[in-house]
Image (cartoon, rainbow, N blue to C red):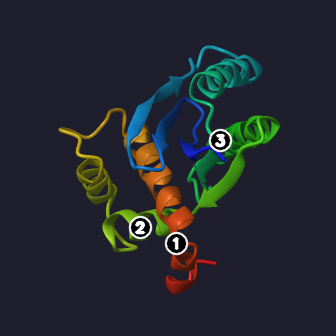
């Protein structure tokens, strides 16, 4: 059996953060996928899909860790992000990845030890956990690293979900 390679995704529409880590907590790569607001939705989705296909081919991830959508102020934004997330999950399933979704609460508790941690606190702790010299930019990339790390923790200790009453 191959060692797990985790693709962490912070879903979005204009910017999608991604990070690839291995089971030893080593970062293989990270970055973001951006789309232009000048393009119609179907072309933006196609661009995102092509970029994800490239990531699948290059890193051969075995697991997708993605943030659960929970609340957006703008209805138009949530619809676009939900459609994009559906496409991301479809592509992951078509590549036979094991798919795992985590709430912001699960991510905050895993990374910062506190469910009400601020975005800055989570990013600072993520930077420390991976031994980085600075917080990756844009913020979505740091979030993707946090999501990937959360899956790494849960995959090594599935009971942590139950201990934190997160199921």
Q: Quadrant of residue 95?
A: top right
Closest to the observer: 77 or 30? Answer: 30
Mark 1 neighbour density, 10 Å: few (under 14) some (14–19) many (20 or more): few
The image position of residue 121, as x and y in percent, is: 27, 59
State the residue position of label 3.
81
Q: Which residue is at the far left?
A: 133
Residue 10: assigned label = none
Q: Position of residue 29 (x, y in %)?
A: 42, 30
Question: What mark, if any, has residue 110 been given in the picture?
Answer: 2
The Cα–Cα distance between marks 2 and 1, rounded to whole angstroms, is: 11 Å
Q: How crowded is the residue under tag 2: few (<14 C-alpha within 10 Å), some, or many (20+)?
A: many
Dot placed on the residue nearer the N-terminal end, 1 or 3:
3
Q: Is residue 66 left or right of residue 123?
A: right
Corner quadrant of residue 14: top right
Q: Position of residue 55 (x, y in %)?
A: 59, 25
Q: Residue at x 41, y 71 (%)?
A: 109
Relative vertical location of residue 65 with respect to residue 37 in this rendering, above or below: below
Q: Residue furthest front?
A: 1
Q: Disc 1 to disc 3, how far (Cα)?
A: 30 Å
* Closer to the eye: label 1 or 3: 1
Residue 76 spot, x, y in % from top left: 67, 41
Question: Alpha carbon of mark 3 to alpha carbon of mark 2: how far?
Answer: 24 Å
Per the image, label 3 sits on a secondary structure element best described as helix
Residue identifier under label 1:
157
Q: Secondary structure at mark 2?
A: helix
Q: Is residue 41 left or right of residue 122?
A: right
């Amino acid at each position: 059996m191959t060692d797990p390679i985790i693709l962490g995704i912070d879903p979005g529409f204009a910017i999608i953060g991604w990070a690839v880590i291995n089971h030893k907590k080593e970062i293989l790569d990270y970055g973001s996928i951006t789309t232009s607001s000048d393009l119609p939705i179907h072309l933006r989705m196609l661009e995102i899909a092509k970029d994800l296909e490239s990531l699948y081919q290059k890193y051969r991830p075995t697991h997708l860790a993605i943030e659960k959508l929970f609340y957006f102020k703008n209805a138009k934004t949530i619809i676009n992000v939900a459609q994009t997330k559906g496409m991301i999950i479809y592509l992951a399933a078509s590549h036979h990845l094991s798919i795992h979704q985590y709430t912001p609460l699960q991510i905050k508790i895993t990374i910062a030890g506190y469910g009400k941690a601020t975005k800055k606190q989570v990013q600072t702790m993520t930077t420390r956990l991976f031994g980085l010299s600075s917080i990756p930019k844009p913020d979505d990339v740091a979030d993707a690293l946090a999501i990937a790390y959360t899956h790494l923790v849960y995959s090594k200790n599935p009971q942590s979900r139950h201990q934190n009453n997160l199921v």
